[in-house]
Amino acid sequence: MALLQISEPGESTAPHQHQLAAGIDLGTTNSLVASVRSGVAETLPDLEGRHLLPSVVRYRADGAAVVGHDALTAAIGDPLNTIASVKRLMGRGVEDVKRIGEYLPYEFVPGSSGMPLLHTVAGDVSPVEVSAEILRLLKARAEETLGGELSGVVVTVPAYFDDAQRQATKDAGRLAGLNILRLLNEPTAAAVAYGLDKGSEGVIAIYDLGGGTFDISILRLNKGVFEVMSTAGDTALGGDDVDRLVADWIMQQSGMGSDAGHVDMRRLMQTARTAKEALSTVDSTGIELVRDDNAGWSGELSREQFNALIAPLVDRTLGPCRRALRDAGIRASDVQSVVMVGGSTRVPLVRERVAAFFDAEPMVDIDPDKVVAVGAAIQADILAGNKPDDEMLLLDVIPLSLGIETMGGLTEKIIHRNTTIPTARAQEFTTFKDGQTAMSVHVVQGERELVEDCRSLARFELRDIPPMVAGGARIKVTFQVDADGLLNVTAEEQTQGVTSSIEVKPSYGLSDRAIETMLRESMETAAADRDARRLREEQVDADRVLEALHSALAADGEELLQAAERKAIDAAAKQLDEQRQGNDYRAIKRAIEAVEKASSTYVERRMNSSIRKAMAGHKVDEFNSP
Amino acid sequence: MAADHSTTHFERFGLAQSFDVDPDLLDERYRDSQRAMHPDRFVNATDQERRISMQQATLINEAYQTLKDPLQRGRYLLQLAGRSFDDEHHTNSDINFLMEQMELREALGEVRNAADAFAELGVLMDRIADDIARLAGDVQRQFRSGDAASLDLAADSLVKMQFFRKLQHEAMELELALEDELAG
């Protein structure tokens, strides 16, 4: 076959040159970047030795975005401009946000293409742009560590992500200037990290409970090939929900009402998370809740109580496990081992229930937070062409059925869930009116009968159909799902061989043109003189901080601050004012941080009272009203 | 899709055109083919090579899915033999078969009321699985005979198998629903 003579992997670029490649785990709570160095795949730390990057982005008034630990620290003081858990919003529409967003404190604005935008001081941003900020930082970290430009990356997604969520992730990568070699399913990445292809054969299960998503995949291993037999999950179930249950319990016990301000709510969630983490190692933990009005509360939560709280949630993950086994056509006893992925699998009850369900001791040797990034790095290394002799091959599946809308709002399945990708299916359509030259096809994803119960992916307009009598035209529409699990549609009129043009309207997400505009804008900024830009940014920031501080102090400084507190703030402000006159952006930045630190208690007191006043009618409520 | 219609699914894996397929050999040929053609092997190649790789990998997957499953394999063989396979046309006149279908369907509907629903369902699922296995044996013999009358019988058997498959699917969905209800 002629095809076999086309170049071997890696040869089309310089064959002997090592390509810099990385794997990125873009998580709900934390993100990581990993790479294969000297034959070892490992996650890359920041300058302070931290591997996990909090998936938090804070927008400042000058348009700059702060990502990671600094943003997380600021989350309490600046909740509306600090975006966390953005993965939950990826590829989602306004309707979904209504459901998910009730827990998120952000202000949503409807976007142009059905995609909600988040309102910040830096303007309205899409979840794709927020994710791109996180990816950009990880890209920079990898390039600084590895000492060169990345030739390509593998970005992981939950196996149960639908087409819109995958597309949004890929768009974020493009926006961050990454060459995405492949979107890899997180459970599959974990299996790769464990090196299960080396020697072992048989069936394994990957149980992946992340911050905001749950995935279960059943894989068959044979001679270096990872064949995904089935996958199931819940894209709105994760460790965040555990935190929320603990937070609810604390609220109940402490008498804290749901009308508490953003600052109190953020603190509550943090307290709940700390308690959850403690209970993975101790039998009982003390809880101290500090509230803004100084009405503190302290209590004790035992592991037994904790287990009772979260048992229903853990059991909710077993439904998809049963579904995945059924779709794979096997019984739990056929599964030889279970790999645990995601920070939430540290919870002892999760391990117990999973061990009991599969009757197998869960594998926890690799840090469950890092295992996905490590697997992605190994795959990236191979895809980049650094290991031309490697036999490893991943055969993944499409997690949810693809269908089209037929008469009466019913779904007709075109490609069934758990079909190995890439896959394609052609479907014939005909005109129902004489001389009809266009028609519309609505593509949905999901298992339900009614279109309204499935996810709307896109509407395709078929144009340029040659005018014929009704039923005369035969338009063949081909639905192709590529190795990233992304759908592509082409159409051809059969009788006259005309290729109909297709206009794609994604139900949620960015059009190609929107992405290109954003890309161009970000390129232009990148080309600008960086230091000058940073200095200007810091100066603007300093002015903003000082102005805000002075007007605040004038308004209620006397009322809210004690003399000593006021003195500390004034000293920091004076220092910043001096640095502002200089040319050292780093010094200005440090001075700003000092002011923020000195005034943090004050700012919290102010924000809490003002946000409480402004709460009514904000956040997601705008969408809730009929 | 831009299918290469001159190549049959059997030819694609270098297998003889027959209902009798060695499953291990099929698995092996499938893996080898994907190792050579999968898009993962061409991420750095030209656009054209990548497109071809995706089309080929798609065809390999389709061929594997078709040949792996006795029902799909049988239907595909009939299609290659130039016989149109139409479920509507093959409405069964086999009274025994129709009676059993009705009986099984009724029994499935009653499972929820049984004292031990899972045990009852298990018995029914075993019975359905036996029926499918028996039909697969029939189909195998009929294809081996290979004459026109036998192929007609094979088509009949495949339609019946399709019915049992549907029942099997419903039984599995019911079991899943029962398990989920039990788990609360």
Image (cartoon, coloured by chain):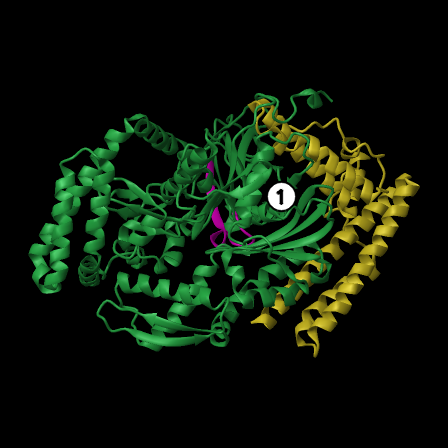
Q: From the viewer's perspective, is A338 left or right of A88?
A: right
Query: Is residue A451 a member of the stretch shown in magenta?
Result: yes
Q: Colour of chain A?
A: green
Image quadrant of residue A65?
top left
- Of the 4 image quadrants, the one containing the N terminus of chain A is top right
- Badge 1 local density, few (<14 within 10 Å), some, or many (20+)? many
What is the letter of the yellow chain?
Answer: B
Which range is magenta? A445-460
Three-letter amino acid code at disc 1?
Answer: Asp
Instruction: Please state which of residues A340 and B142 is positioned toward the viewer in this rendering.
Output: A340
Q: Can you give x and y, in whole percent of width and height, for residue A229 in the image?
A: 67, 49
Q: Mark 1 falls within which chain?
A: A
> Mark 1 sits on what residue?
A396
Q: From the viewer's perspective, is A433 left or right of B183?
A: left
Q: Residue at x 52, y 71 (%)?
A: A311
Q: Is residue A6 above or below residue B161?
A: above
Q: How many marks?
A: 1
Q: Is residue A207 above or below residue A156?
A: below
**In what element is the residue under mark 1?**
loop
Q: Residue at x 47, y 60 (%)?
A: A239
